[in-house]
Structure formats: structure tokens, C-alpha cells
Image (cartoon, rainbow, N blue to C red):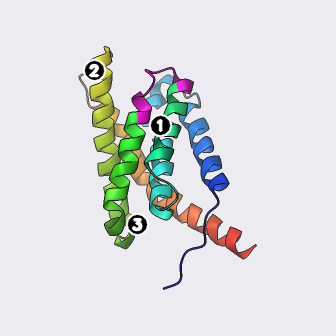
Amino acid sequence: MARAPMVPLVVVWLSLVLALCLQVMPLADGWQVFRPEWGGLMLIYWCMRAPDRVGVFHGFVFGLLMDLIEGTALGQHALILSLLAFLAALVYPRFRAYSLVQQSVLVLVLLGLVQLIEQWLRTLTGDFSIHLSFLIPSLVSALLWPWLATMFHAIERRMANA
């Protein structure tokens, strides 16, 4: 089987910075709950696409950047996103064999689990919430997964042909 072309780390970090910008982009008050987890989606994509180059370290550094920009407790997002990268590395062999719909379900589970842990951490720091609306971004992200994966595969093919 032919190996996939090596993706430069500059492309990975540019896409992660774009995800960071999308993550902190202002939305109307009623729409905040429907914001996808752009950082988590991008991190899962790159952990699945280039597992030998992108991993827990990238999740940690990206999480620190997100902590600094959002003003949360330093290390909160770093812990969450490094855990997400670790979980993505655990399911990597199965993930690659799944169809896009099955991958979406797995993305829903991964991001939902990470959202639950993030909500638990927020509860420890004093931001207590009793409703389950914090899981909606995981659902929206899972619905966006097939589109995002297809778009990035097409971009990678164009970059390889150029």
C-alpha cells in the first residue's frame, strides 16, 4: 500500500491556529451553545492523518494557547486537549478503517467524553452548571466531521499534485 505524503508541520499548525481563531470568534448569545469544537476537530483530524507527527505534545501546546486566549485556568484546555490526542491515538487503528458516518459517531464519543471532563473541571473551579447543554458542541462537531475530513483530504490531494 502506498504511504500518504508527509504533511509539513507548518500546515498542521496553520490549521490549528485557524481552528483557534474559529473557536474564539464572537457569536450571538443564543448561538454560543451551537459552536463546534473546532480545536478538538482539528486535533482529531491531524492525530488520525499524521499520527507519527501530531500527538499529545501538540494537544498540550494548543491547549495552552487556548487557555491564554480564553482566559481560563492555565492548563485546563491543555489537559483536555492532550487527553483528546491520547484518546485519538488509542483508537487510531480502528478509526482509519471506519466509514465517515462511523467516524462521526466516534468523534461524538471522543468529544463528548472530553466535554464531560471539561465540565467536571469547571465545576471544581467554581463555574457550576446543572444542564447538559455543554454536550451540544460535541453533537454539532460530529455532524461537521464528514465535511471537514472530506475537505481536508481534497486540500491535501491538491497540495500533493502541485
Q: Give how far apart the Cα atoms at labels 1 and 3 are.
A: 21 Å
Q: Residue at x 37, y 55 (%)?
A: 88
Asked whether 63 falls inside the magenta stretch, the response is no
- The residue positioned 37% from the left and 46% from the top of the image is 84
Q: Which residue is mark 2?
A: 123
The reply, left or right, for residue 150 in relation to residue 121 is right
| C-alpha separation, residue under disc 1 versus residue under disc 2 | 21 Å
**Quick one: SS at disc 2?**
helix
Q: Magenta span covers which residues?
A: 68-78
Q: Pick the residue in front: 142 or 75.
A: 75
Q: Residue 67 at what x, y percent from top left? A: 50, 27
Q: Earlier in the sequence, mark 1 or mark 2?
A: 1
Graded by Cα atoms within 10 Å as few (under 14), some (14 to 19) or many (20 or more), the crowding at tag 3 reads: some
Total numbered labels placed on residues in the image: 3
Q: Amino acid at mark 3?
A: Leu
Give the residue displayed 64% in from the left and 72% down from the top.
157
Reading the image, the residue beneath label 1 is 35
Pointer 3 or 2: first along the chain: 3
As drawn, the label of residue 100 is: 3
Asked whether the beta carbons under mark 3 and mark 2 sit within 8 Å of each other, the answer is: no
What amino acid does circle 1 point to? Arg
Image coordinates of residue 91 in percent, x first then y, are: 32, 60
Q: Residue furthest left?
A: 130
